[in-house]
Image (spheres, coloured by chain):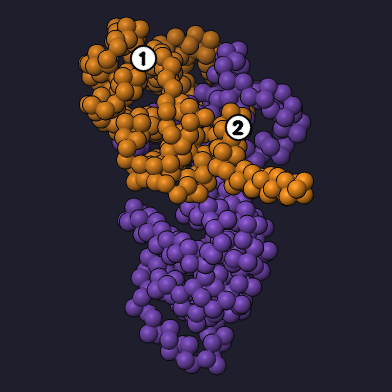
Amino acid sequence: MRAAWNRFRAGVVRNLFLSLLGVLALARQAPAGAPAADLAADLFAEGRWPACIRECARACLAEPEQPAPRVLGAIARLRAGGRTAAALVQLEQVAVAGTNGLAALAAFEAGRARWRQGDATNAFIQARIAVRLGGQPELFARSSCLLSEILRKFPGLGKEDDALVQTLETCRPLWTSALAREVLAPAAVPTEAASAFPPVRWIVALYRANIRPAIGSRCSLTPSCSEYFLQAGREHTLLAFPLVADRLVREPGVVQAAEHPVLGPETIRYADPLADHDFWLRAKGTK
Amino acid sequence: MMKLRHLLMGFWFLWGSAALAQSPGLGTQLANELAADRDHAGAALEYRRLALAEPGAEARGGFFWASAFEYLRAADPVAADRILNRVEAEAPSLGSKTLLLRTEVALASRKWDEAAFFAEGILQSPGAAREEKNMAARRYAVAELRAGDLPAARAGLQRAPDPAPPALAAVETYAQGRDKKPWLGGVLGLVPGFGYFYAGEWANGFRSVILNSLFIFGMVNTAQHDEWGAFSAITFFEITWYTGSIYGGIDASQRYNRDRLDQAATGVNGGAAFAPDALKLPLVSLQFSF
């Protein structure tokens, strides 16, 4: 089920950005920034956000009049997380000014980001632009699905637009449950620390708040023992306890062997990653 | 007359500057310098850019090959694998060179069967160069060694055009040694420290004995004095140390086996490596060292 979902998601992303590649190819007139734009689109499809953002900036400098790299860069910034306000403004500008598939894509992405932020009014405005512009059938299905969800939660927003509600009703067969899940999924946020096994998290929090400030950071290894414990708690829940006990027993030996020194901010530490001590557990898991 | 000559020289200079600015040589130089500075991800990106700017399919394939090579050096075999798909689409003539890189990528991804498959392709390819076959034989042996098939590893090495006695010796040394049994390490770990002793980690074993002894003493002592709060805390830590001893026994054996295998693989590879001649790119001309 999960594999099928992952396949579907990968397919959606691939199709969407193959179409975006098409838009890029159509929109391009001067060849100077062509490799940068192509490379940016490739990097986007691979989910390499920082590199994609850099390439989009390069393409924008080469062809400032082309909106495609700007849109792609803004979407990459949204995907990368962090400060997204400027990216959203850029997308909304393209969405309002444009009349083509690229504008529809910008409007959809802006609408979805606004919806995820809980800004229903702006999400509605952007999603409505995306639906009106249409674009690729897949993009249209996603935009209409998003708009329908906004109107389901906030029916007041579309009460003066019967034609729009009618249009959405006719789109309903396009929305598969997988598509709806993908469109309406909350933004992926890094939850690494939060997802560790709760007792492990509590012990590490207690140690970091009350013990470490008193005794200082004494671990000679990297990651530190508390970080190692958290990682183990995330990966192996209850097994984190024997794992960290084993680590504490081995620590002097690892320091003495000094095989993998890593220059830290203040001192040299020695690498002892969790992967070196649970590789056999992982191998069993993948068989 | 002088003015006309100056005008012509000016045109010549401008034309030269423009040609230099558009020359792919500068891009190649940047990518090469990034690779030399060990910014392999940056170099991979530059080679990709060069590939996309290249009108000829063969040259495009060459740059993509260099990009995949740099991604592999940047420890990103997934990206390398993806780029190699493009190499195969753009420049099928790179055949054995692409297969060689595919073998490396599969080894880096710990896909032993795949690595053996690609190396086998090179060994069977009539067009592959002698060095490529020598390299493929070693990589094939490593893949089979890691997959646990020692006879296949030996057979692979014997198929190399030039025999490699040190590599064969490494396989034999590995075959003569014995792995530790992780389950036995775990069972011995029930007696604190003995799991570590079994794998030859004496210092770790003694530390485990001392820690467990201290905490067991603490448990007994606090129980005798009816200090049940302290007893609970010490018991919690002792359970952690004790389970750690069992886990450590298993893990120490696993690490022992892995290190033995790594040592054998290093012996088989024997420092054999290859790299493209950066100055000839986009023509992929490999330089081998054995």
CB of mark 2 within 8 Å of CB of mark 1?
no
Which of the 4 image quadrants contains residue A19? bottom left
Q: Position of residue B61 (x, y in %)?
A: 41, 42
Q: Can residue B190 be seen in the rendering of this structure?
A: no
Work out whether residue A95 can be spotted. Answer: yes
Q: Name the residue furthest front.
A: B1
Q: Nearer the viewer, residue B39 or A141?
A: B39
Placement of A98 over or under B253, stated as above or below:
below
Q: Which chain is purple?
A: A
Classed neighbour count for the residue bearing mark 1: other residues with Cα under 10 Å, few (<14), some (14–19), many (≥20): many
Callout 2: SS: helix
Residue located beneath label 1 in the image? B268
Please indicate whether residue B109 sits to the left or right of residue A232 in the image: left
B219 vs A5, nearest the viewer: A5
Label 2 resides on the chain identified as B
Q: Are marks 2 and 1 on the same chain?
A: yes
Q: Which chain is orange?
A: B
Task: Please give the label number shown on residue B33.
Answer: 2
- Which one is earlier in the sequence, the residue at label 2 or at label 1? 2
User: Camera-side residue: A259 or B6?
Assistant: B6
